[in-house]
Image (tube, rainbow, N blue to C red):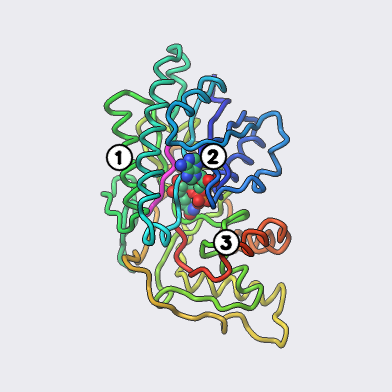
Amino acid sequence: MSIRRILVTGGAGFIGSALCRHLVGSGYQVVNLDKLTYAGNLDSLRDVSGSPAYSFHRLDICDEAGVLDILRRERVEAIMHLAAESHVDRSIDGPAAFLETNVVGTFRLLNAALAYWRELEPEAQRRFRFHHVSTDEVFGDLPFDSGIFTEETAYAPSSPYSASKAASDHFVRAWHETYGLPVVLSNCSNNYGPYHFPEKLVPLVILNALEGLPLPVYGEGANVRDWLYVDDHARALELVVTRGAVGESYNVGGRSERTNLGVVETICDILDRKQPLGGGGRRRELITFVKDRPGHDRRYAIDASKIERELGWRAEESFESGIEKTIDWYLANEWWWRPIREQKYAGARLGAGG
Ligand code: NAD
């Protein structure tokens, strides 16, 4: 018998909501547990919120007793842990929240998961998984012209965000080695796609460019990220939790390295084609270079051959096809982004995502 009832933490966020939509669409029973911080948005779950296969609990992962209660009541068979503070710029301005949720929150969630797992019958214990969803940023900085992150690459985080994610990865492994909790981990590159919060690079550029606003880019825009369409990530996560080997980690990436400037220019050119600016101006002229982010890693690059070889996963979208889909989604779904943008984020800075 395989896993059918999955608790997703952070399911109201960007990747979490894509995962909930994917899992419900694939026949799983999904329990979404989310605190609904500024980054959580139940509008992103409109497609599944009426489904009998979906339920939602508003809860902080730091509430260990509350989490344990939900695990018992919902008879959860696996946890997919995505809840986190996720924006690098915010971690530089205010690291405390990153320690609280990403490190302490993961520790509390592990405690609740372990207590619950110990109560299960042997067969259910054997089937149970704690899947920790992490980032390639834990591996730190690569030179522009060489190197690639494998599952064996040593951790060397640079930002408060990546340090907090690295710490949480270590705790997850320790709960496996020390207490026997059946864990799997995945470390993914930069995601983009629908329902992405408008403070991150791709949606912010799309929306600023759409409105003819300046497109500030850090440094010279030379930083390189490996971009992955979010639905490709959701399929990878399903494979890791259902077929990944216990105690193992899997790197997930799109084999789509692009400089930040390249990403911004591609978005400008597609929007010029789809919705030309009045007066005939070109959106590339809106690009302005601003002082670089401190500790800004030059390049991330993912070797995804393990998940491709062992679990048969492959990214289906190229950067070109995925970014086109993403732009079409933002053009068609102003109902989703307009209220968020009007609240606070119209003038936010452009980073590398994160
Ligand atoms: P996000 O910021 O869009 O969403 C995070 C979600 O977690 C929100 O719904 C928020 O309300 C919830 N949350 C935050 N603190 C919580 C708490 N204490 N208790 C319960 N819920 C809480 O993030 P995202 O971009 O969807 O990323 C999801 C996960 O994937 C994160 O763990 C992140 O580190 C990882 N990741 C992200 C990327 C990326 O490119 N976005 C890449 C690799 C890995």
Confirm or reject: label 2 Cβ below 8 Å from ligand 1.
yes
Magenta residues, as a range? 132-137
Asked whether residue 305 appears in the rendered view, the answer is: no
In depth, the one of 96 and 274 nearer the eye is 96
Residue 200 place in picture, x, y as percent = 52, 61
* Mark 1: amino acid: His
Q: Residues within 10 Å of mark 3 (few under 14, many from 20)?
A: many
- Between circles 3 and 1, the one closer to the viewer is 3
First-in-chain label (3 vs 2) = 2
Q: Which residue appears at 42% of the width and 62% of the height?
A: 89
Q: What quarter of the picture does the N terminus occupy?
A: top right
First-in-chain label (3 vs 1) = 1
**SS type, badge 1:** helix
Q: Main secondary structure of the magenta part?
A: strand
In depth, the one of 147 and 86 nearer the eye is 86
* Mark 2: amino acid: Asp
Q: What quarter of the picture does the C terminus occupy?
A: bottom left
Q: Which residue is mark 2?
A: 34
Whether residue 135 appears in magenta in the rendering, the answer is: yes
Q: Tell me: 250 left or right of 56.
A: left
Labelled disc at residue 170: 1
Quote the CA–CA distance across marks 3 and 2: 19 Å
- Between circles 3 and 2, the one closer to the viewer is 2
- Residue 152: quarter of image: top left
- Specify the farthest residue to the top: 121
Q: Which residue is mark 3?
A: 198
